[in-house]
Image (tube, rainbow, N blue to C red):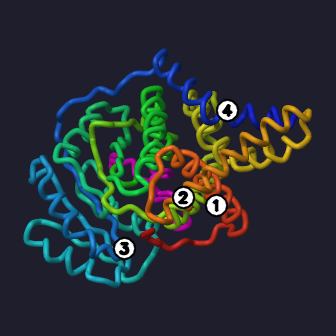
Amino acid sequence: MAALFWMSLGTLLYIYLGYPLAVWALARAFGREPDRQDGMPSVSLLIPALNEEAHLGEKLRNSLALAYPADRLEIVVASDGSTDRTNAIAESFAPRGVRLIAMERNLGKSAMLGRVVPQLRGEITVFSDASSELDAQALRVLTQSFADPRVGCVSGLYRLKGDARGEGEGLYWRYETFIKRQEGRLHSILGAHGAFYAIRRALFEAPGATAINDDYLIPMRIVARGFRAVYEPRALAWERELASVEGEFARRRRIAAGNCQQVVTLRGMLNPFRHGWVALCFFSHKVLRTLAPLLLITTFVASWWLEPTQAAVFLTLQGLFYASAWAGHLCQRRGVAVRWLSPALYFCLGNLAMLAGLVAFCSSGRKPLVWERTR
């Protein structure tokens, strides 16, 4: 059991500390930035929407104000069976060039994208959430990397606007952003920020009705064909709507189930002879990260079989860490954010959601999923 403890702890340290440092070092030694030019390709800005009446009007005004030539920009709202005023709001912007493609019923986001993207006109398809706000120069900056013919996907930088939980969640996003930057420099990021990313429309492959994380599968299938998926931190997207801790847990649980699905669907990406550095990143960032909750459990359980002094130290440290996460949760339920408690809270929240997603994936099989927005 002592060997199991050290193996589990060592793997966790690699996942959260060793791998970020390793990919940073590899990116410095072997990475390269894409060739960027201000080519202004034709763009279709696609806004998937399911009951987004609270945000769609502001989103469309923001989209129409982007610093991009109007004759090179198509704005499309894809409504997935919305039952509120989403369609009516989109239609009210038709005189300003906004196009609505409405599904008669809720197909699920992945299935809906499979129908809508082939109908778009632009050379570049840009996906952007209805609840996100784009920087005025974001679209122009995002498309610059497509001047490099080896680039098939570009992800913008996703940031959260502050609220009571912003500090811990913001730290999580800074950590993930650091890793994405290094992976993109080394070769390719593993998935994109769904709030704002772009692909060459000619490379689009429908993710399928059972796909959970379309913003991961679409880019990774492009990478599997030999193209790069890169990160563009100058292209900013701000999230206006922040979920409660419970809503955030539900969102992450769904993403976690998608991570399990991706590991199975894209297992061919683990071949280092075919995919090189991407295989290392996929194994470290996706496969091992998916197993992290199980490693946390085995680390705790195996701690009891250590030599008494070691057991006391490690059990005390783990107990204090989990207690601080619980205290952070109780504080946030009362609308109070305690900065030093937030990192533990969001670390535990993410891993608990990952465990729930793993269980959900194993128990659900490949059932088609409809699109449910987290509020």
Coordinates of residue 182 in the picture (x, y in percent): 46, 29
Identify the secondary structure beneath mark 1: helix
Coordinates of residue 5 in the picture (x, y in percent): 83, 37
Question: How much space separates mark 2 and mark 1, taking CA atoms?
Answer: 8 Å
Q: Report the side of 146 relative to 208 (left or right).
A: left
Of the numbered discs 4 and 2, the one sitting upstream in the chain is 4
Comparing marks 4 and 2, which lies closer to the viewer?
4
Identify the secondary structure beneath mark 2: helix
Amino acid at dot 2: Arg
Kindly check if marks 2 and 1 are in contact, taking CB atoms under 8 A apart as contact. Answer: yes
State which quadrant residue 164 falls in.
Answer: bottom left
Q: Which mark is residue 252?
A: 2
Q: Which mark is residue 40?
A: none
State which quadrant residue 120 falls in.
Answer: bottom left
Comparing marks 3 and 2, which lies closer to the viewer?
2
Height in image: 38 above or below 324?
A: above
Amino acid at dot 3: Leu
Q: Which mark is residue 357?
A: 1
Height in image: 50 above or below 135?
A: below
Q: Which mark is residue 13?
A: 4
Height in image: 302 above or below 351?
A: above
Q: Start and end of the magenta stretch?
A: 197-219
Q: Which mark is residue 50?
A: 3
Coordinates of residue 155 in the picture (x, y in percent): 36, 43
Amino acid at dot 4: Leu
Instruction: Identify which residue is drawn at 30% across, 52% down.
Output: 238
Of the numbered discs 1 and 4, the one sitting upstream in the chain is 4
Amino acid at dot 1: Gly
Of the numbered discs 4 and 3, the one sitting upstream in the chain is 4
- For the residue pair 240 and 40, the one nearer the viewer reads as 240
- For the residue pair 232 and 1, the one nearer the viewer reads as 1
